[in-house]
Amino acid sequence: MCGIVGLFAKTGEIEDRLGAYLGAMLVQMSSRGPDSAGVAVYRDPVPAGSSKLVVYSADPAEDWGALAVALGNRFAACEHPMRRASHAVLVVEGDVDDVSGWIHDERPDLRVMSASRVIEIYKEVGLPTAFAERFRLEELAGSHALGHTRMATESRVTTEGSHPFSTGLDLCLVHNGSLSNHNRLRQSLRREGIEFRTENDTEVAAGYLAWRLREGASLQEALEGCLADLDGFYTFLCGTADGFAVLRDPIACKPAVMAETDDWVAMASEWRAIAVLPGSAEARLWEPEPGVVYAWERQAVA
Amino acid sequence: MSVAAAVETVDLAVTPLRELNQRLHDLASEPGPRHWRVVNPNGAHAIACGLDADVEVEIDGHAGYYCAGMNKRATVTVHGNVSTGVAENLMSGRVIVEGSASQSSGATGRGGLLVVHGDASARCGISMKGIDIVVRGNVGHLSAFMAQTGRLLVCGDAGEALGDSIYEARLYVAGIVKGLGADCVEKEVREEHLAEVRQLLAAAEITDVEPASFRRYGSARRLYTFEIDNADAY
């Protein structure tokens, strides 16, 4: 099973309430995935030279302030951390790889969920309703966002095994389905220098996209590469700094529906997740074709 | 009876789905309204399933999975789209979808008529066993997969692998067939087939499609052991 949702705002009003709408969509997908939930929200870009990290701690008493002080001592500056349930957002003046590397070395007990300039990833085990409440999704304004409700099949129910999976550089991936060649693909991607933290199949797909992009492929080409190189069932929703893209495997066992109005573009596993959006009854509605990449990007302001 | 003439409206924004379906099931053994209107379906699953009564149910909006599945006798009209498995295992009666349908429409249907006025997607009529399916638009890949009997009539195009591993179902397509599945072949359209096309179009109340524009597809009977003497059993 698993449920996927994505929402792309075309107006300021939708941007302001993006997290609230995404949370409502996520809750509709509870019966498709009650094990864990997660979101990636694209919001509040930090200036060039700064990095935005979302970090998870299993310790409810984690002293995020102390971590920020330590980061501020090591790097040029670190803003006051913004705590959100078991996660915190840290904005650090410094190179994203250096900051991530420092956390990895100094605090191996922490997990960096996302590290870039725009994306914020939050994920946790448990029901979507509890997740939306604990992470105060209704506060999160942004340009676009995607989310996932997980029914675990290929690996254990853990925070790390929850989606979305970051693929670096403001890219992330959510997945409905299961891949059958992930073990072998993980081995060959490791030889290419791609790191993996879990035994999860989706993390391999995310790593595959990261590798293709690193080698110079466009997002379109990287996704089309999945059609040849990934074996299994999938509906993918891939977030980028500017928008998102959808791909279903050629057999298309896993569902997907898309809808568009003047105010938003939405993608979900099922219509009932889109029905909660304003103006959904009048939306243009279609089922994405198998093996075809659908992509939306924000237009540069003229 | 005045009660029979009234339209019973059920709002799924306030009434639980189980309550609606229970009230519809009760009509198999108890008198009650014959004309129902369901509002705010919002993609809920299994709306108006398992009916066994001469009732008419209209659904105002988009329905979720398995809408009108397993029904006998009832007429269900969806003023919108449906998700996976509309009219699956339909026994008799009619299901009319004014919009489009997702995959596996009419799957394993034993009888009755399913009409989709928009497009149906992959696996339309998979394992059909006697249902008639009329699609005004296109159908996706693997439609009529292992179809045993019944008729599938597509006014638009059909995707890859139409009729893969088909048994004795009869397929009619007016548009382009992207590819035929294993053991599915094009067959001659004789007068009795033209009559069948006319009858299906009339049953679906489609008047603007030329019956002569359909081509017929069916089993080459090389994949299973077919005994002509047992043809009546299908």
Image: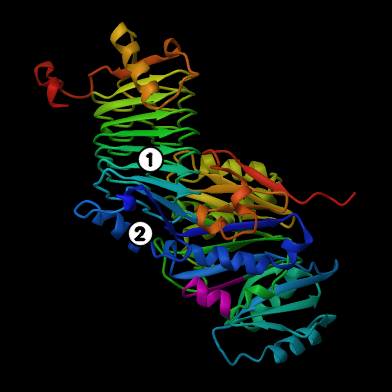
Percent position of residue B211, x then y: 42, 13
Image side of residue A26 versus residue B7, left or right = right
Q: Residues within 10 Å of mark 2 (few under 14, many from 20)?
A: some
Which coloring applies here? rainbow
- Which kind of residue does numbered mark 2 sit on? Leu
Which residue is pictured at 26% across the width and 40% down the height? Answer: B73
Chain identity of mark 1:
B
Quadrant where the C terminus of chain B lies?
top left
Q: Is residue B10 magenta?
A: no
The magenta stretch is A122-133
Q: Residues within 10 Å of mark 1 (few under 14, many from 20)?
A: many
Numbered disc 1: secondary structure: loop
- Which kind of residue does numbered mark 1 sit on? Ser
Residue bearing the label numbered 1:
B104
Numbered disc 2: secondary structure: helix
Instruction: Check the image and name the residue furthest to the left.
Output: B229
Q: Is residue B178 above or below residue B141?
A: above
Sequence-first disc among 1 and 2: 2
